[in-house]
C-alpha cells in the first residue's frame, strides 16, 4: 500500500510532499570516514519505529580514520525496487541544518546547501514498510578540515541595542566576493531572525558589503537577531567561511520626521500620530538639502562646522566656522538637523542654510531628545537631488523594493523563511 505524507524542511520552514511506500534500502553518499549508530531493534508492525539497520548502508566508509570531504554534497538513495525515502534531516553539532530536496518518487534526497568543514553531522533517515510502520536509521559522520587557511570573516552592524524602524542591517566581509554563485553561498549563510516576521532581503552594496532591510519599515517592537552560519563553509577553493559575532536589535517606536523645504517646517510623527511641527530653514540655492528618506546615524551635542568640510574655500563669501549644538546626523558628508540660532529670523519663511535643516536651539534640543539611531528624516519639496542609496549614510529606503531585490544573489531562488511575511509590516 502507499500513502502521501508531508514534512517540514528544517532549513526553509516550507512543507514538502513525500510519497512513502515499502521497506527501504538506503545508501548514504558521504565520502570518506562516516560512522553510524542504530536504534534498538523493533518490529515493523509495532507502533514504535522499527530498526532499519539491516536496510541502511552508506558509501565510502573507511577504516583509516579519514573524514568526509565537506566540499561534496550529501546524498541519500533508496536501493531496491520497492523502497522509498520518507524523510531525511541532517544537522551539525552547533544546530545548523543542511537544506535538501527529496525527489518526487522518493528515490533520492540530496543536500542543497554546503556542508561545513571540521564538523560532526547527525543524519536521521526515515522509512516506512508495506504495512505503514515507520523505520528509522541514524548516521553520524565527521568532515575534514579545509585545505586553505584563508577565511571570510563577517562583521555585522549595527551593534546590539535599540534602534528606530528604519535601521538597515549591514554585513562587512573581510575579503571581496565577486562571483554570483559564491555570493549566493555567503548570502544563504547570513541569517536574519525577526519576530514578528517581515519580508526582507539582502542587497550587495559592493564586493565586500551587504545591507539588509525589510520591504517596509520594521514593525514597532520587533526583535531582530543577526547571525552567520558561514563558519567552515566552502566559498571557493581558496576561501572558506570564518567567524562572525551575532547581534540583537530591538526596534522602538516608529518615528518619522518630515522636513518640507517649500513650507519651511518639520513635522515629527510617532507611530503615525503628529507630535510637533517646528519652523525650519533648509538649503539655499546652490546648497539644496537632499530629498528623500535618510536614517539617523547618530547624535552629537557639539560639532564645530566649517565650510571647508563641504568644499567651500576658506575666506570666500560662503565660508563659515561655527559652533553647533544638538546636532542629529543624517549623512556622513555633514548633513544634520541642528540648532541654528543665527537663522531664527528665516526659519519658517526662507531657506538659507548650506544644506542642513536648521531650527532654534530649544527646538533642536527637543528634537535631539526625541529621536534615536534608526529613526527617519524625510525631506520633501527641496530642489536638491535625491539622497544617494549608499556611501553617505543610509539612503536604502530610496531604492524601490523590486530594485532592492535585484541586488540579491538569490533573486531567482525560492523565497526563504526569513524573506516571507508572517505579519504585514507598517508601510512607509
Image (cartoon, helix red, strand yellow):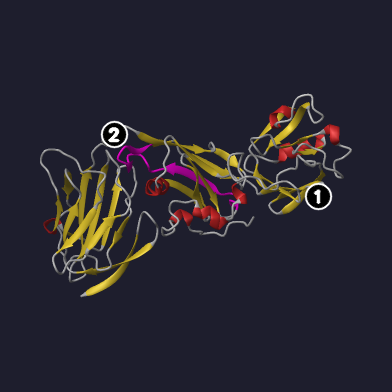
* Residue 216 magenta-highlighted: no
Left or right of residue 393, residue 269 in this image: right
- Numbered tag placed on residue 398 in the rendering: none
Q: Position of residue 273 (x, y in %)?
A: 73, 53
For label 2, the residue is: 148
The magenta segment is 217-242
Instruction: Measure the C-alpha gap from mark 1 to mark 2.
Output: 59 Å
Residue at position x 16%, y 39% from top?
Answer: 66
Q: Residue at x 24, y 41 (%)?
A: 143
Residue 233 magenta: yes
Query: Residue beneath label 1, please?
Result: 262
Pinpoint residue 194: horizontal percent, then vertical percent.
Answer: 50, 50
* Residue 185 image position (x, y, % from top left): 37, 47
Q: Tell me where residue 176 sits by quadrant.
A: top left
Q: Position of residue 220 (x, y in %)?
A: 61, 50
In this orientation, which residue lies closer to the viewer: 178 or 73? 178
Residue at (47%, 43%) from the top-left corner?
A: 226
Secondary structure beneath dot 1 equals: loop
Is disc 1 surrounded by few (<14), some (14 to 19) or many (20+) residues within 10 Å?
some
Up-down relation of residue 327 to residue 111 (above or below):
above
Within the image, what quadrant is residue 23 found in?
bottom left
Q: Quadrant of the C terminus?
A: bottom right
The quarter of the rendered structure image containing the N terminus is: bottom left
Front residue of 425 and 153: 153
Residue 105 makes an appearance in the image: yes
Say what secondary structure mark 2 lies in: loop
- Residue 115 versus residue 151: which sits nearer the camera? 151
Amino acid at each position: 500500500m502507499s500513502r502521501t505524507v508531508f514534512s517540514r524542511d528544517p532549513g526553509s520552514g516550507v512543507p514538502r510532499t513525500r510519497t512513502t511506500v515499502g521497506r527501504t534500502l538506503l545508501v548514504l553518499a558521504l565520502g570518506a570516514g562516516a560512522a553510524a549508530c542504530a536504534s534498538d531493534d523493533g518490529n515493523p508492525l509495532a507502533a514504535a519505529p522499527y530498526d532499519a539497520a539491516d536496510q541502511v548502508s552508506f558509501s565510502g566508509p573507511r577504516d583509516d580514520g579519514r573524514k568526509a570531504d565537506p566540499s561534496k554534497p550529501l546524498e541519500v538513495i533508496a536501493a531496491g525496487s520497492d523502497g522509498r525515502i520518507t524523510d531525511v534531516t541532517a544537522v551539525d553539532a552547533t544546530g545548523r541544518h543542511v537544506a535538501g530536496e527529496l525527489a518526487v518518487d522518493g528515490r533520492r534526497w540530496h543536500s542543497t546547501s554546503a556542508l561545513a568543514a571540521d564538523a560532526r553531522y547527525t543524519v536521521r533517515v526515515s522509512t516506512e514498510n508495506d504495512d505503514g510502520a515507520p523505520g528509522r536509521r541514524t548516521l553520524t559522520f565527521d568532515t575534514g578540515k579545509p585545505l586553505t587557511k584563508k577565511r571570510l570573516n563577517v562583521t555585522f552592524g549595527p551593534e546590539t541595542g535599540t534602534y528606530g524602524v528604519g535601521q538597515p542591517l549591514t554585513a562587512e566581509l573581510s575579503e571581496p566576493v565577486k562571483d554570483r554563485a559564491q555570493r549566493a553561498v555567503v548570502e544563504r549563510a547570513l541569517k536574519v531572525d525577526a519576530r514578528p516576521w517581515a519580508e526582507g532581503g539582502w542587497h550587495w552594496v559592493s564586493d565586500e558589503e551587504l545591507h539588509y532591510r525589510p520591504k517596509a519599515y520594521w514593525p514597532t517592537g520587533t526583535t531582530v537577531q543577526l547571525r552567520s552560519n558561514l563558519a567552515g563553509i566552502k566559498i571557493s577553493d581558496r576561501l572558506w567561511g570564518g567567524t562572525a559575532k551575532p547581534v540583537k536589535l530591538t526596534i522602538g517606536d516608529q518615528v518619522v520626521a518630515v522636513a518640507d523645504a517649500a513650507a519651511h517646517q518639520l513635522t515629527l510623527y510617532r507611530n503615525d500620530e503628529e507630535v510637533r511641527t517646528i519652523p525650519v530653514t533648509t538649503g539655499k540655492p546652490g546648497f539644496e538639502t537632499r530629498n528623500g528618506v535618510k536614517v539617523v546615524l547618530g547624535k552629537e551635542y557639539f560639532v564645530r562646522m566649517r565650510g571647508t568640510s563641504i568644499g567651500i574655500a576658506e575666506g570666500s563669501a560662503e565660508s563659515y566656522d561655527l559652533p553647533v549644538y544638538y546636532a542629529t546626523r543624517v549623512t556622513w558628508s555633514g548633513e544634520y538637523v541642528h540648532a541654528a540660532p543665527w537663522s531664527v529670523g528665516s526659519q519658517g519663511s526662507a531657506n538659507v542654510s548650506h544644506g542642513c535643516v536648521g531650527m532654534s536651539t530649544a527646538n533642536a534640543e527637543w528634537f535631539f531628545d526625541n529621536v534615536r539611531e534608526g529613526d527617519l528624516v524625510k525631506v520633501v519639496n527641496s530642489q536638491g537631488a535625491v539622497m544617494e542609496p549608499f556611501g553617505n549614510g543610509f539612503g536604502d529606503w530610496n531604492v524601490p523594493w523590486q530594485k532592492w531585490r535585484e541586488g540579491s544573489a538569490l533573486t531567482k531562488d525560492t523565497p526563504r523563511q526569513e524573506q516571507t511575511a508572517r505579519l504585514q509590516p507598517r508601510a512607509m
